[in-house]
Amino acid sequence: MDNETHKNQSEVTALLNSEFLTEPTRKVLQERFEKVGSNRFFDDASFQLISVVCDLLMDQDSENRIVNSALAIDERLSNKEGDGWRYNSMPPDPVMYQLGLQGIAETSVRLFEETFLKLDKKKQIEVLNAIQRGKVEGGIWKKLNSQLFFEEILAETAEIFFSHPTVQVSINYVGMADAKGWTKLKLNQSENLEN
Amino acid sequence: MQEYTNKELVDAVIIGTGAGGAPIISRLAKAGLKVVALEAGKFWNPKKDFATDEREQNKIIWNYERLSAGNDPVPFGRNNSGIGVGGSTLAYTAYTPRPHPNDFTINSDFGVGKDWPIGYKDLEPYFDELEQFLGVSGPTPYPWGPERNVGYPLPPNPINGAAQLMERGCDTLNIKTSPAANAILSASYYQEHVGEREVCTNRGFCQAGCNTGAKASTDVTFIPQAIHFGAEIRTECFVTKLNTDESGQITSVTYLKNGQEETQFCKTVFICAGAIETPRLLLMNQLANSSGQVGKNFMANVGSQIWGEFEEIVHPYKGIPASLISEDLRRPEDVDFASGYLLQSIGVMPITYVSQLCRATGIWGKELREKMSAYNHVAGINIHGECLPYEHNYMELSDENDELGLPKPRIFFSNGTNEKRMAVHAEKVMEKIWDIAGAKNTFKVSRNAHIIGTCRMGDDATEAVVNAQGKSFDIPNLYISDNSLFPSSLTVNPTLTIMAVALHIADMFLQEYTTSRN
């Protein structure tokens, strides 16, 4: 899927430079499109692990990644930003992420006697499935609800991933190109850049 | 803009500039009172500051962390709590159905919940006034409820893809639908002291911030009016303390601005900070709680959704997200629950959609990518249903502090039997509608929307926090005006009623104020 997504780079650049984006919108998307950075909150090993987990959640090839959602998670946690709420049964986000990653490492060893990053993709998916379904035992998961942890990391990863202009264009979303508004609201009607 | 010094004894401090606060700020300023509004967030310039990007627009969401407990923990922030001049109206869909007379009498009618100490007749003049002032676009005559004194000032907005699909399903099932009433302009609109507001461009971004001024958030309606009449809007002020004298009256309000404490002296305080921050401020200060009701009776309207994929291209980001309504099931017959619900169509922006999709269905990886590739064919339908007040639903102060050093609120919420039965009923109806409309791959999102209650108004000081004029039973110069004082959650979206109650409170206050001065 991602090879196709990568092919749309020229389409994305054209969209970002088009007259259909307001200046504030262009600024935000251009910055996100060009964004590079490095981990500040997670240590290198944890960052490598969460990056691969995020790739799996979004079915991305880690060698050919479009968006590293882990970078935005790292940035949010190091800036101590929240989103307005958390489950009362869960620890604060920085603690939840640290514990959750330890839990992934533990579960990997328990199921396959191997570290997560050394597993093949199929086994990595099995580890994540076990965590999502609560089919985990002991260790970290005694103090952290694995299903809620999975829900949290999945929702945050997806929100970041689908906010990237390249990914948005790949699902034919052009709602950001609204500087001139929309006039054709009937079913099956398209206008401007719409597909 | 008029500015006052902290030392000056102003007539009123209003905490919060959303639907509960802004009408009071404007009304009191117009009457010539010295008014200072304290707003925790910024005064945005939507044209320059707002991007059509949900992630960026998280800046208009109240992001101070709340702890969600109970069997059905409520997600806070997006869709129920805003920050900045305009408060939650920055993020509301501007759905403005009127409540019906029997929305205020649920206990008399069903023997559950709580009646209001005021009724439809008390608020009717304010509904009339608000619809004209905000520039509500809607059908005249409106198909449900009592006859109106005046019609909507503007015709309805065009209906989007999701609405056309809901119309299709409902027609076959003989469920009457209508374009909704929204405080969003279907034509440009001039108001004195506000100026000309432009027609809506159908950009579908109401919940993440309108950048054209077509949506009647308070920052483009009541607040400019209030400033014209001499009110001061003081931004980035987080109120922490209500200071009292020996008699128990409030003498001043202390707030944090740029990390420093400042104190404004005042004769009267109106707390308009919403169903969580209002009781939180009172509990932190241990004030106005002789009834023990501060923080109690937290409600969240039943808001179940059904999403489906259609053969047709829907482009769910276009048009007013909630553009079709049916009130036929507001008081359904032969059901096993009290009250009822509205049916509403929903368009959706991609991040809101994917977030709900992940949390509700748990799909990820390849399956999620495939599901999201159908985004342009997605449409939703949801309900807005009554939630009863229960003892088991409340907010309290936790022992965990936020970044300002203040205790985070913890909110317990579990649906009761009435809400569960209503959701089951509604889901069946919505599934039928979506089936007929041609939906495939449907999924359900069980949720509760709109936060209500926690500082109930009533006639009895032992079981309510404020009286029918919004005045504290304990502190004569303290008022509350926001969704926290609702004794019941109503079947309709709350904002129009919050504003109407605010105007009622302002006028009652001014009447008393004028009498005492003469």
Image: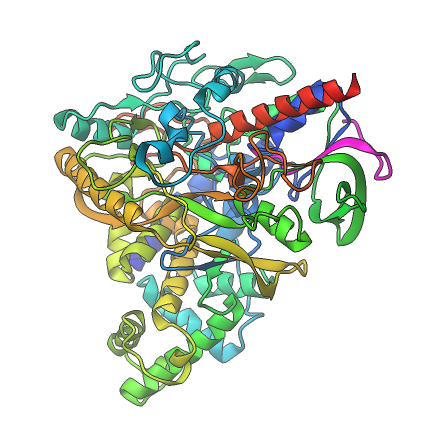
Q: Nearer the viewer, residue A189 or A64?
A: A189
The location of residue B492, given as percent across then percent down, is 38, 31
The answer to whether residue B15 is magenta is yes
Q: Residue furthest right?
A: B7
Classify residue B365 as left or right of residue B225.
Answer: left
Quadrant of res A169:
top left
- The span shown in magenta is B1-18
Residue A60 seen in render: no
The location of residue A25, given as percent across then percent down, is 51, 40
Residue plotted at (39% across, 14% down):
B155
The answer to whether residue B379 is magenta is no
Quadrant that contains the C terminus of chain B: top right
Residue B245 seen in render: yes
The location of residue B7, given as percent across then percent down, is 87, 38
Look at the picture and state if B99 lies above or below A117: above
Quadrant of res A117:
bottom left
Q: Main secondary structure of the magenta part?
A: loop
Q: Nearer the viewer, residue A122 or B153?
A: B153
Classify residue B326 as left or right of residue B201.
Answer: left
Residue plotted at (33% across, 48% down):
A170
Labels in figure, total: 0
Look at the picture and state if A27 lies above or below B140: below
The location of residue B382, given as percent across then percent down, is 29, 39
Residue plotted at (29% across, 30% down):
B330
Q: Residue furthest bottom?
A: A113
Q: Nearer the viewer, residue B122 or B351?
A: B122
Q: Tell me, what colour scheme is on the image?
A: rainbow
Quadrant of res A67:
bottom left
Classify residue B378 as left or right of residue B12.
Answer: left
Q: Nearer the viewer, residue B311 or B398?
A: B398
Look at the picture and state if A130 lies above or below B295: below
Quadrant that contains the N terminus of chain B: top right
